[in-house]
Image: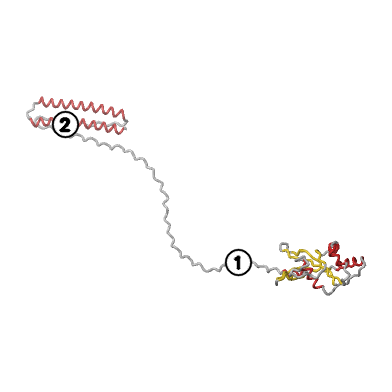
Amino acid sequence: MRGRKIVSAVLIVAVILGIVGCKAKGTRKIVEDDIGITTASELETQKETTEIKEESTTTLETTESTVTTASDTVVPESTEPSVSVTEGSEPAETEPTPAPTKDPAPTELPKATQTPVPTNTPVPTSTPEPTATPVPTNTPTPTDTPTPVPAPFDIDKSAKENGYEIIDIDMGDGKTERIYGYYVDMSGLATRINDYRESIGLSRLPTDSNHVSEMKTRAAESTVQFDHWRPNGHLGSEVNLSGGVNVETCYNGLFNSDAHRAWWEDTRVFSIYCVGFKRMRYDEESGKWVGHGGATVVFMDF
């Protein structure tokens, strides 16, 4: 602000000096146009010049006072040009003092612009050259180890190992059915029958040895088809047929049947043979042999 006031004062001084110069030029022009101007005119011109000088001095002092008040810097007074006019000659022209050049006003520095934060420019990565895909070799596929398949269960072998008989029953029409089991000695039943015969005054019967194989077959067949008629459709030769292989149970069942007991009381018979068959079957769930019924036959030959 102080610099601007100083510049303004300097400009005012320059203006005043310019006016003085113009007045001087006017005086010179009058001299050129009319050489015969009187001394009084010259005095008048000098008076005007003096007044202008005084006015310029007053203005300069006022300006100087203003500048001194506004700023601590004192502007030095300008040297006033002197104009001397001699009679019969052209007054010398005093060149005005050039006005001091105006100091360029201090320009405001541009506000600092925010420097943009550089972004991380991705560094281009070099594209790797494609590598040749390896040709897969024929790797042998590991074969699963086969689970050992257990051998089929040999039921006949198991039956023999357990002491069971293997019997094929004639079912007729060329068909057979294989069963397993064991024979039961039912001689105790023959003894009980002889005891009954003796109690009623009849003779005791000897054991028959000629029909053993036949009666064993009939006992086994009776566990498949419990009937005096055989599975093949023929009639059996036994006189009594009882379920189970228990002596007491068979005796009581037959004794309580009049038809069956009648054979015990027949006077024509001369031999006796009793045999039973206990049928067995293999239970796959338990892996064991279990009972599957039984039958007893009584043979009497006559």
Mark 2 nearby-residue class (10 Å; few <14, some 14–19, many ≥20): few
Amino acid type at mark 2: Cys
Q: Is residue 101 left or right of residue 263?
A: left
Residue 174 drawn above or below residue 37: below
Q: How many marks?
A: 2
Of 200 and 295, nearer the camera is: 200
Residue 272 drawn above or below residue 128: below
Q: Earlier in the sequence, mark 2 or mark 1?
A: 2
Amino acid type at mark 1: Asp
Q: Is residue 167 left or right of residue 62?
A: right
Residue position marked by numbered label 2 in the rendering: 22
* Quarter location, residue 84: top left
Foreground mark, 2 or 1, reads 1
Of 291 and 220, nearer the camera is: 220
Residue position marked by numbered label 1 in the rendering: 144
Residue depicted at 77% across the width and 64% down the height: 293
**Disc 2 and disc 1: Cα gap in Å?**
127 Å
Q: Quadrant of the C terminus?
A: bottom right
Where in the figure is residue 221, as x and y percent of width and height? 76, 68
Residue 274 drawn above or below residue 22: below
